[in-house]
Every structure is written in C-alpha cells, then in structure tokens.
Image (tube, rainbow, N blue to C red):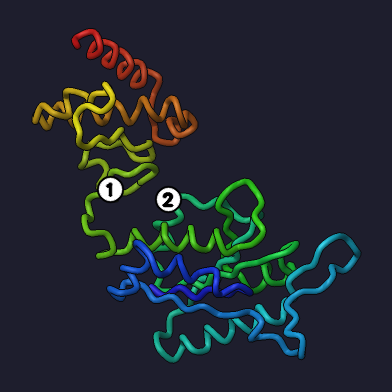
C-alpha cells in the first residue's frame, strides 16, 4: 500500500516512520510512505497555505489551491505507475469516527492520500470536491491532522498481509470484526480477553489457574467469558453491536461466580 501524506510539517513523521511496525513494513515493502510539504504547492513568495476566513472570525483557514495542486500532482504521478485512483482522506474532527471496521475497509485500498489540516480547518471546497473521505479519530480537537494520520496509517498497516509476524494475533484483538473470529470462538466486536505472562505470581497476584492447566478447551471458554465480562464493564455500548443478549451476559456472570467459588 502507498500512503501519500500532505502536511506543512513533514518532519513530524520522522521518528514515527523510523521505529516499530511502520519501519518494518517499509523495509519489507508492504507499504511505501511519501511525505509532501504543502508549501511546495503554493504560488507566492511567502509560500502561504492559509488565509483569513470570509465573513470574519478567529483563526486562519487552509486555502484550496495548494491542496488541490498537491492531490492532483500525486494522482498524476500515480496514473503513470498504477492507474488506480486513490482515496483522498481529510483528517478532520467533522469526519466519521475511525474504527476497526473502517481500518479494515481502507486496508483493501491500493493507495491512500492523507490530508493533514491545521488552524481552523480547510476551505469547504476541499471537503466537498477534493476529499473522498473525511475521518476523525475521536470526539475531541487536536491542533492538526498529523497525529490522526499516524494513527490511521498504523491501524491500516497492521491489517495488511505479511506485516504482522503472527497473522492469527490480529484476529482476537479488541474491536476486530473479521469472519475468522467465529472460528476462533471469539465474538466479533468485543474487547480482548485478559493476557498474562511470566512470572505466574507477581507481588502475590497470581495468574488464573485455568491458563496454567494446559486444558485448551477450558482456556478458550475462560477467554470468551472474560472478553464478554470485560466488555460489559468497560464498553457496554459494544454488547448490542456484537449481538450479545442479556441472557448470555447473565449466564457468563453466573459461570464466573461459580468458577470463583470452586477456587
């Protein structure tokens, strides 16, 4: 996959691309990341990317011309190499909220253009006539689109084939909604079950005995139950989306209480 990032701060992405998953995905050619300085697409001596909003008001707004030039330049060069149109994603608090399902949808694209806005946002003609998608990473406001772009890029990249060393690991993660979840016994859209590693006892806190038993059927049953119970406490809003009935939740709680009495 190709990520083209349009930003006035290309240096922001330096450390992000030099560590962890993104670094390995670039080295393995699973992704390519191209940084485009928006100021390179301006037409004045001051390389101005913003101006005051019509009608008055505080702050500055990104002008349409540089953004249109940047996206059209990227699309023009890509037509020579692939012929596939890219989705142009405007990172904005006004967009639809980014989630795992949207990450999976975007991971099926050949290329993404990520537009990082700043100040009071962008000229509305960019959103209406240039961007194919408007995406927000949450109901809060940041100073710019660079952090959201980094979040989106990592979430999408880790879903690409060959990026993760263990392809099965992403199937049981929180919010995952892939068909393979059914085969693993995990309900789609629930939070991940609790994870433990060595030592088996730390500061008198012990790992649940079932995880040390070697009984894989009991372990899977415990994990399914814990996933459901954790979701009911931390993200109850996800239960309905995952199709969890009140009876299922009640049964899981009763089973947990019974297991606790057995210890």
Is 38 on the left or on the right of 205, as rendered?
A: right
Badge 1, how many Cα within 10 Å: few under 14, some, many 20+? many
In the displayed orientation, state which residue is furthest to the top. 261
Whole-percent x, y for residue 31 in the image = 36, 72
* Element type where label 1 sits in the image: helix
Q: Earlier in the sequence, mark 2 or mark 1?
A: 2
* Element type where label 2 sits in the image: helix
In the displayed orientation, state which residue is furthest to the front. 203
Instruction: Determine the CA span between mark 2 and mark 1.
Output: 12 Å
Q: Is residue 150 above or below residue 125?
A: above
The answer to the question of whether label 2 and label 1 lie on touching residues, with beta carbons closer than 8 A, is: no
Whole-percent x, y for residue 24 in the image = 31, 68
Q: Which residue is mark 2?
A: 100
Q: Which image quadrant is residue 182 in? A: top left
Whole-percent x, y for residue 78 in the image = 46, 85
Q: Which residue is mark 1?
A: 171
Of residues 10 and 217, the one drawn nearer to the viewer in this rendering? 10
Is 239 on the left or on the right of 184, as rendered?
A: right
Q: Is residue 130 above or below residue 155?
A: below
- The residue at the point 40 percent across, 69 percent down is 18
Whole-percent x, y for residue 68 in the image = 65, 80
In the displayed orientation, state which residue is furthest to the left. 214
Of residues 1 and 200, the one drawn nearer to the viewer in this rendering? 200
């Amino acid at each position: 996959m190709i990520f083209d990032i349009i930003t006035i701060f290309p240096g922001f992405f330096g450390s992000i691309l030099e560590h962890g998953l993104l670094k390995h995905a670039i080295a393995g050619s699973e992704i390519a990341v191209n940084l485009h300085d928006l100021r390179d697409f301006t037409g004045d001596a001051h390389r101005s990317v913003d101006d005051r909003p019509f009608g008055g008001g505080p702050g500055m707004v990104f002008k349409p011309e540089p953004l249109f030039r940047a996206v059209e330049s990227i699309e023009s060069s890509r037509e020579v190499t692939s012929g596939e149109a890219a989705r142009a994603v405007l990172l904005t608090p006004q967009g639809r909220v980014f989630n795992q399902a949207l990450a999976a949808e975007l991971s099926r694209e050949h290329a993404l253009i990520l537009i990082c806005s700043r100040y009071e946002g962008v000229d509305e003609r960019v959103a209406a006539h240039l961007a194919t998608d408007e995406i927000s990473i949450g109901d809060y406001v940041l100073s710019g689109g660079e952090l959201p772009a980094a979040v989106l890029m990592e979430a999408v990249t880790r879903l690409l084939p060959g990026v993760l060393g263990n392809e099965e690991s992403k199937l049981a993660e929180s919010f995952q909604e892939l068909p393979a979840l059914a085969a693993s016994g995990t309900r789609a859209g629930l939070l991940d079950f609790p994870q433990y590693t060595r030592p088996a006892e730390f500061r008198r806190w012990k790992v649940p005995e079932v995880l040390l038993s070697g009984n894989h059927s009991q372990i899977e049953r415990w994990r399914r139950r814990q996933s459901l119970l954790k979701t009911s406490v931390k993200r109850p809003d996800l239960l309905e989306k995952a199709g969890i009935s009140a009876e299922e939740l009640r049964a899981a709680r009763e089973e947990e209480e019974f297991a606790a009495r057995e210890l």
